[in-house]
Amino acid sequence: MKAARAETAKQFAFYGYVMVISGLLLLPFIVTLLRSLTVTLPDGRTTLGFRPYLDIIGAFWPKVYLSLSISITTILIDTAIGIPAAYALVRYNFRGKKTLYTLLNGVWYVPGICYALSLILAYYFLYKWFLGYWGFIAAYTAGFLLLMIMTCIVAFRYLDPCYEESASCLGAGRLTTFFKVTLPLIGPGVSAGILLIFVLAFNEFITALLLNPPTRLMTAPVRVYADIRNYGVREFIAAEAVILQLISLAVVIVYLKLVGTKYLRGVILV
Amino acid sequence: MKPLALLTPAIALEVCLFLIPLVMLAVVSLTSGDSFFFTPEWTTSNYFKVFTTYSFDFQITFTLIISAAFLDLILGFPFAYIMTRKIRRFTDVFRAIMLVPLFGELYIAYGFYYLFLPGGPLSFIFSALGIPVFKALYSIQTAMIALAIYTFPFAVYNIGISLQGIDRSIEESARCLGAGSLETFFRVTLPMSLPGILGAWLVSIGWGLGAFAIPVLMGGAMVAQRMLSVEMYSIALLQLDLGMASAIGVILALVAVIIFYFSLRASRGALI
C-alpha cells in the first residue's frame, strides 16, 4: 500500500517536471497569443478581441502566400531529389560514401548566417539570375535537402528489403518495383521529411532576411521581424507571429494525427 | 554506376549551392572592404582584426552560448531521462511540444521580448524585486534562457538517444549485485550516458552560434548584440565591409563544424 502510494507520488513528480518544461517551451507562444488578443480601447482600457487579426489581413496575407508557395516548391524539389539519393545511400555500397554523406549533410552544420552570407555573395557574383523568387527556392532546397535524405534513410531502414525482392521475383522491373512497392511503403517516412522541411522552410528567417534587400521579396517571418524592429511589440505583430505559428502547429498536429511520431524518432525526436 | 546516377542531382545541388558559395566566402574574406566586386585588394588583415578588434565579441558569444548549453543540460537531462525511462502515457504529446521551438527563434525572441518589456506580464515581478525592467530585458541572463529554450530539443535528442542506447541488463545486474537505485544511477547510468551529455552540450553550442533573432531582440547594445552572428550581419549589410564579415563567417563556420564533428563523435546522434 505504502509502496504503491510512493510510486504514485513519483509518477506525479515525473509528470509535473515534464509538464513544467513543456510549459516553458510553449511559454513564448502562449504569451504571444495572449498579446495578439489584447485590444486597447480609445479610452485606454484593454479588452480581449480579434481586432488585431482583422487589421492585418490585407497586408499580411500576400507575405504568407509567398512563404507558403516557397516552402511547397522547396518540398516538391527536395522530395524529387532526396528520395533517389537516400535510396542510393541505403541500398548500395561504394567508395567515398561517408565523404559524400558529409557533403550532403554539411550545410546543416554551418550557422545560418554564414550560409546566408555565402549564398548572397555567390548570387551577386556567379548566379545573377537567382536574385529573385528562385533564389529563395535554391537556397531553401539546398539548405533542407538533408532533412529529406535523413528521414528517407530512416524509412528505408524500417523497410524490409524482402518486399522489393519478392516483387522483382514476381517479374516486376526495377522502376515498377520502386513506384509500386517501395514508394508506397516508405510514404510515411517521406512525409516526415515533408513535415520537417515545411516547418523549417515556412519559418526560415535568416536567409530570407539577407535575400530581402536584393530580391525585394519579403517572406512572412521577415515581415514579422521588420515590424518588430519598426513598431516594437504592438498587438498586430503578435497576431502575425501567432498566425505563422498556428499554421505550422496545424501542419504538425495533422501530421501527428495521421502518421504519429514513429518516423520522426531517430531523426529529431527521442 | 547506378548509385552515382541516383545521387547526381543531390550532389550537384550541394556543390553549386553550398560548396561553391562557401569557397567564395573564404575568398572574399581575403579581400578588404567590398573591393572584391570591383578590383580585389588582397589582404589577410581581416583575420587579425577578428582576433583583436572583435575579441570581446568572441567572449560575449561564447559566454552566452556555453552558459545556455549548461542550462540545457541541467534542464534537459532529467527531461530526457523521464521521457525515455519513467513515463508511458502522453509521451507523444510531449514529443509534439518538443517540435515547437523548431518553428524558429524569432517567435521565442518575440515572446520573451514582450514578457520582459516594461508594462509586460512580468514587469510587476521585477518592480517588486527592485530590478529595473530594462536591465532585466537587456541582460545576458534573459538572452541565455531564450537561447536555452531554442536549443533545448537538440540537447534532449542527443541525451535521449544515448540513454536509449544503454543496455538495460547492465543496470539490472548492478541492482542484482546489491546497488541501490541511486547508486545504480550515479555509477552506471550517468557514466554510460556521458558521451551523449557531451554531445548534447556541443550541439547546443553549435546551434547557439547561429542564433540571430534572440540576440538581436533581447540583447542590449552592450551585451548580446555583440554576438558574432549579429555583428556579422551588421558589418555585411550596414557597414558593407564584406571582407570583414566573411572573415567572421569563415571562423564561425569552422568553429561550428569542429563543434558538430566532436558532438557526432561523442554521441551517436545521427543528424543533430
Image (tube, helix red, strand yellow):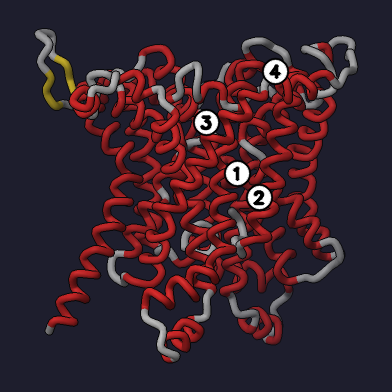
The answer to whether residue B266 of the structure is visible from this angle is yes
Residue plotted at (42% across, 50% down): B99
Same chain, labels 1 and 3: no
Same chain, labels 3 and 2: no
Does the residue at mark 1 contact the one at mark 2 (Cβ under 8 Å)? yes
Q: List x then y, in percent, for residue B51.
A: 73, 25
Left or right: B162 as drawn, with respect to A237: right
Does the residue at mark 2 contact the one at mark 4 (Cβ under 8 Å)? no
Label 3 residue SS: loop
Q: List x then y, in percent, for residue B218.
A: 42, 25
Instruction: Please name the amino acid that badge 2 sits on.
Output: Phe
Above or below for A173 versus A41? below
Instruction: Please name the amino acid that badge 1 sits on.
Output: Gly
Residue plotted at (39% across, 46% down): B100
Marks 4, 1: nearer the viewer = 4
Q: List x then y, in percent, for residue A250.
A: 35, 46
- If you read the primary sequence from the N terminus, does the residue marked by circle 4 or circle 1 appear first? 4
Residue B84, quarter of the rendered image: bottom left
- If you read the primary sequence from the N terminus, does the residue marked by circle 1 or circle 2 appear first? 1
Q: What is the CA distance from the residue labelled 3 to the residue labelled 2?
A: 22 Å
Q: What is the CA distance from the residue labelled 1 to the residue labelled 2?
A: 6 Å
- Mark 3 lies on residue: A205
Marks 1, 3: nearer the viewer = 1
Marks 3, 2: nearer the viewer = 2
Residue A136, quarter of the rendered image: top right
- Mark 1 lies on residue: B206
Instruction: Please name the amino acid that badge 3 sits on.
Output: Phe
Label 4 residue SS: loop
